[in-house]
Amino acid sequence: EPEVTQTPSHQVTQMGQEVILRCVPISNHLYFYWYRQILGQKVEFLVSFYNNEISEKSEIFDDQFSVERPDGSNFTLKIRSTKLEDSAMYFCASVRDLGHGYTFGSGTRLTVV
Amino acid sequence: KNEVEQSPQNLTAQEGEFITINCSYSVGISALHWLQQHPGGGIVSLFMLSSGKKKHGRLIATINIQEKHSSLHITASHPRDSAVYICASSGMYSGGGADGLTFGKGTHLIIQP
């Protein structure tokens, strides 16, 4: 069964550093998403991406965040200057088309120290 | 803004018991998703439904659009069903925007042998 692949599975970074989280969505899917889950809290929507541009974004997705699909396969989330409160599990997801179910990646656990 | 509420937050049951997890939401949605989150953090999509009832193996999901309520049932529960079960709503799609999912806090289910 096709999978959404996320790398790395764990990343530890120092406060103020830039991090890039990588995702390879399923190849024939059209919509891509980033979500985050702070430890012990519910999953929160960050951003959706369609047709090579941001479709929707939440209040969390401020200027320190950016997304790219540089080569038609990878889908990346960049956090420019990490803060302690950015520590969370970050999930990538893709959907074939609106009205279809989601496929989630296994997540990247980001720890900012 | 949609709010998604789940109950119970925690549920411990004996193997073989019939399990019901409830979900309510506050505004009209296009679909309701049931997801399973394993202890390692990965999220698996179980169901997406916009009306009626769906069944997959021992899992059954129902939705009542008028009452803004959905239930997930597990028949003949087994210890391997132990996980966090999350409901999440898709917003009403407008203008082609891919709104992200709004998540509930999840129900932590433990099935004891």
Image: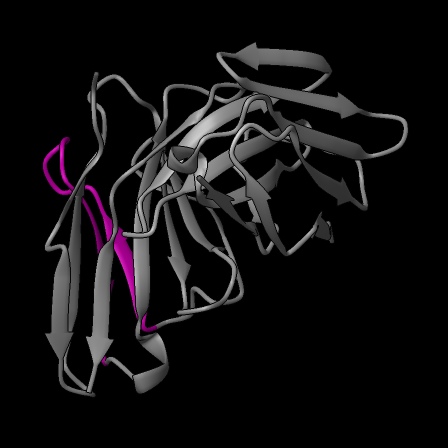
Q: Is residue A104 left or right of residue A21?
A: right
A95 relative to B87, above or below: above
Q: Is residue A84 left or right of residue A45?
A: left
Q: Is residue A74 magenta?
A: yes
- Quadrant of residue B70 within the rendered picture: top right
Q: Is residue B78 magenta?
A: no
Is residue A66 something one can see in this rendering?
A: yes
B78 relative to B11, above or below: above
Residue most toward the front?
Answer: B113
Q: Position of residue A101 (x, y in %)?
A: 46, 23
Q: Position of residue B1 (x, y in %)?
A: 74, 53
Task: Tell me the residue at 14%/55% (across/down).
Answer: A9
Residue range of the region highlighted in magenta in the rendering: A64-81
Is residue A80 something one can see in this rendering?
A: no
Which one is nearer the viewer's eye here, B16 or B59?
Answer: B16
Query: Which quadrant, please, contains the C terminus of chain B?
Result: top left
Q: Position of residue B105 (x, y in %)?
A: 59, 56
Total marks placed: 0
Q: Is residue A41 left or right of residue A96?
A: right
Q: Position of residue B100 (x, y in %)?
A: 52, 43
Identify the colour scheme used. Answer: one colour
